[in-house]
Amino acid sequence: MTTHPSIRRKGFTLIELLTVLSINILFLAILLIALGGAREQARRVQCAGHLQQMGLALALYADEYHDCIPQTANHLDPNSQENWHRNALLMKTLGLASNRRERSVITCPSHANPGRNIAGFLEDNEMDVWISYGMNVAFGSCRTDAHQRRKRLEFKQPSRVMAFMDAYAYGNAVGEVDWQSCLSPCDAYRHGDCAQVQFLDQHVGKTPQLVHSCSEEDIDFAFWGCYWLVP
């Protein structure tokens, strides 16, 4: 009787399978991180485009009104028509109407919930306008430390003066950003720990965490445009 040598089947061991699986998972994680970074970069570019359009609309508004800048807000009333995001002419220039509960040029694509008032001044925390940006409160509000109406020519360094930036709708300070610490929750740093900023000369840049101080120490007067506070 003829005997045959035993035939040994070759295959992957459990350790080899686990090693290959681990490598595949690592590659997938790297790919997802890269794709996530690319998506955020796209959102950042789109956000900058929104800010650019807002800066252009502000300039067109000022051209129409003898160099006057739209008033930032009526600080006491989040629903006031004086608030820049409810200013009919400014919004019309941006191609928008009132009561915009949808994403638009005044919402940042990296803002997860642009319709939420984060301080809960409204009963259901939801606003009738979805907004992701704040205007420099030094452009005029009913606060006692800000002028009611200002002109572009009043600002000595327009390339350093913040006009709009990434912000949250905080309390009754919807659409506002201020140098005072009481409004520091308005700032939003959505893009790599930075906020995107549209300056008064219409260029778009970014800024890290801002300094807020009611004592006027460490204040960048040029950035805030509050020159009347300089001793």
Image (spheres, rainbow, N blue to C red):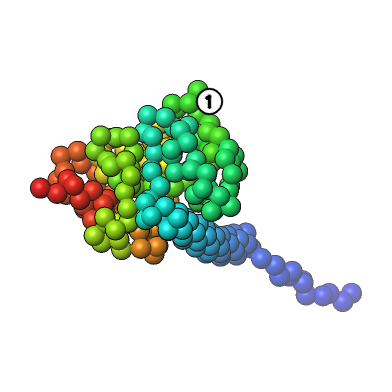
Q: Indicate the position of residue 26 as horizontal and vertical percent values.
A: 54, 62
Q: Give me the residue at 40% from left, 47% from top.
A: 70
Q: Secondary structure at mark 1?
A: loop
The percent position of residue 112, horizontal first and vertical second, equals: 52, 44
In this rendered view, identify the residue nearer to me: 66 or 189.
66
From the image, tell me which residue sits under label 1: 124
Mark 1: give few (<14), some (14-19) or many (20+) Cα within 10 Å: few
Q: Does residue 33 appear in this view?
A: no
Residue farthest along the right direction in this orientation: 1
Q: Nearer the viewer, residue 206 or 228?
A: 228
Report the residue that reaches farthest toward the left.
231
Q: Residue furthest top?
A: 123
Question: Could you say where residue 180 lies in the image, as x and y percent from the top left?
Answer: 25, 40
- Who's the residue at 47% across and 46% down the image? 132
Horizontal side of residue 24 vs 131, given as left or right: right
Who's the residue at 25% across and 61% down the image? 157
Name the side, left or right, on which 3 lies relative to 179.
right
In the picture, the quarter occupied by the N terminus is bottom right
- For the question of whether residue 158 can be seen, the reply is yes
Nearer to us in this view, 21 or 200: 200
User: How many discs mark residues in the rendered view?
Assistant: 1
Instruction: Tell me what residue is drawn at x 23 percent, y 56 percent.
Output: 222
* Amino acid on which disc 1 is placed: Asp
Q: Residue furthest front?
A: 66
Nearest to the observer: residue 158 or residue 185: 158
**As displayed, is residue 92 above or below residue 33?**
above
